[in-house]
Image (cartoon, helix red, strand yellow):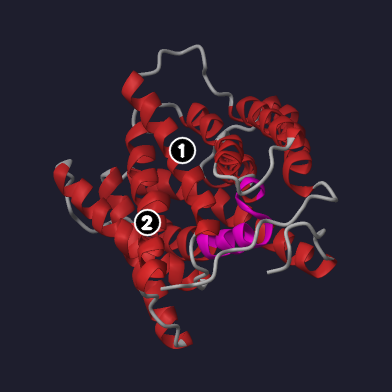
């Protein structure tokens, strides 16, 4: 990877942008898929099934591509990434969304770029950028408008802490990638999802979930989407964006996804489209432009060499 002081070349910029847009579109269907899944399956059990199946698919892809299993520090890093990005984050998010309105949850998750920015600055990976701060605040306001987050409602303290914990875990997993030895995105996600699925199955068991397979066709279709598009493809693409753009810029995926989710939900789940989407979407796009897409932004720092 080239020096962080150089500007992003056209080819590299196009590749990162393509991965960013594709990841946002595929990730936008996740909340709708989870909504269908939760109508029949207990939340943690559904999450465990999702990431367990996704891990199996990625391990099979690893075998076909003849990708080697990482060792030493690289293996430990992939496991830690998976525990944070999939295990801790989704356990907390599923718990929180039982009692928190989806609109408020989406608005809080839109703070991931801000938390990622603070973390990369604190960990001396990137300098503080005022445009990133402004972009995050604009985008979060846009998500709040688009999703009609009911900020006036009483929010259970534990649920609020859980979703904020999910935000912190997601952001730290994103930042962590550049501190780890480089690992192929397929391998990183295969190892990470395997580790996370163990935690999710354990959490589902501890929560007393009913372990049963779906009976409805809609649930099977939702799980199929969540496994293939919402997990395998989305997070492989997301790691590609992180490697090309750095953690603070890649995290802007989390402010685009809610807007895509609202559109998909209106199409597939008959959710009403409101004027809030028309008002909020431009703020989201402006925030993403300022924080992630504006010309002249620098490359992320060079990833450390694999010493595992």
Q: Is residue 115 found left or right of 302 in the rendered image?
A: left
* Residue at left offset 85%, top offset 50%: 295
Q: Is residue 42 magenta?
A: no
Characterize the magenta stretch by its predominant secondary structure: helix
Position of residue 281 measured from the top left corner of the image (x, y, whole percent): 72, 35
Above or below, 70 against 81 in this view is: below
Quadrant location of the C terminus?
A: bottom left
Above or below, 191 against 264 in this view is: below
Position of residue 78 measured from the top left corner of the image (x, y, whole percent): 40, 63
* Residue at left offset 42%, top offset 56%: 81
The residue at which mark 1 appears reads as 168
Quadrant location of the N terminus?
A: bottom right
User: Mark 2 or 1 closer to N-term?
Assistant: 2
Above or below, 283 against 17 in this view is: above
Name the residue nearer the viewer: 268 or 259.
Answer: 259
Q: Is residue 41 visible?
A: no
Name the residue nearer the viewer: 290 or 297.
Answer: 297
- Stretch of the chain drawn in magenta: 234-249
Above or below, 234 against 123 in this view is: below
Q: Quadrant of residue 279?
A: top right
Secondary structure at numbered mark 1: helix
Cα separation between marks 2 and 1? 14 Å
Query: How many numbered marks, from 0 up?
Result: 2
Position of residue 142 measured from the top left corner of the image (x, y, whole percent): 68, 29
Query: Around disc 1, counting alpha carbons within 10 Å, would you say few (fewer than 14), some (14 to 19), or many (20 or more)?
Result: many
Secondary structure at numbered mark 2: helix
Position of residue 40 measured from the top left corner of the image (x, y, whole percent): 29, 47
Q: Is residue 83 found left or right of 233 in the rendered image?
A: left
The residue at which mark 2 appears reads as 80
Query: Around disc 2, counting alpha carbons within 10 Å, would you say few (fewer than 14), some (14 to 19), or many (20 or more)?
Result: many
Name the residue nearer the viewer: 272 or 152.
Answer: 152
């Amino acid at each position: 990877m080239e020096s962080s002081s150089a500007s992003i070349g056209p080819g590299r910029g196009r590749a990162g942008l393509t991965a960013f847009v594709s990841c946002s579109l595929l990730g936008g269907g996740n909340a709708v898929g989870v909504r269908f899944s939760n109508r029949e399956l207990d939340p943690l059990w559904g999450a465990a099934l999702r990431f367990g199946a996704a891990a199996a698919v990625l391990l099979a892809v690893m075998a076909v591509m003849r990708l080697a299993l990482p060792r030493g520090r690289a293996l430990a890093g992939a496991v830690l990434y998976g525990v944070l990005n999939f295990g801790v984050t989704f356990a907390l998010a599923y718990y929180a969304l039982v009692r928190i309105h989806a609109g408020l949850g989406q608005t809080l998750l839109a703070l991931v770029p801000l938390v990622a920015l603070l973390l990369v600055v604190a960990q001396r990976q990137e300098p503080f950028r005022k445009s990133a701060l402004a972009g995050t605040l604009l985008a979060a306001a846009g998500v709040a408008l688009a999703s009609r987050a009911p900020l006036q409602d009483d929010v259970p303290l534990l649920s609020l802490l859980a979703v904020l914990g999910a935000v912190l875990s997601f952001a730290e997993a994103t930042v962590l990638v550049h501190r780890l030895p480089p690992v192929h995105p397929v391998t990183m996600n295969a190892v990470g999802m395997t580790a996370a699925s163990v935690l999710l199955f354990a959490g589902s068991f501890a929560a007393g979930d009913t372990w049963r397979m779906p009976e409805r066709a809609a649930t099977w279709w939702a799980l199929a989407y969540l496994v293939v598009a919402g997990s395998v493809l989305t997070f492989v693409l997301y790691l590609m964006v992180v490697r090309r753009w750095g953690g603070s810029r890649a995290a802007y995926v989390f402010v685009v996804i809610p807007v895509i989710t609202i559109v998909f939900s209106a199409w597939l789940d008959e959710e009403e489209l409101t004027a809030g989407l028309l008002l909020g979407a431009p703020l989201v796009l402006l925030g993403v432009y300022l924080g992630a897409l504006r010309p002249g932004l620098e490359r992320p720092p060079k990833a450390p060499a694999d010493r595992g």
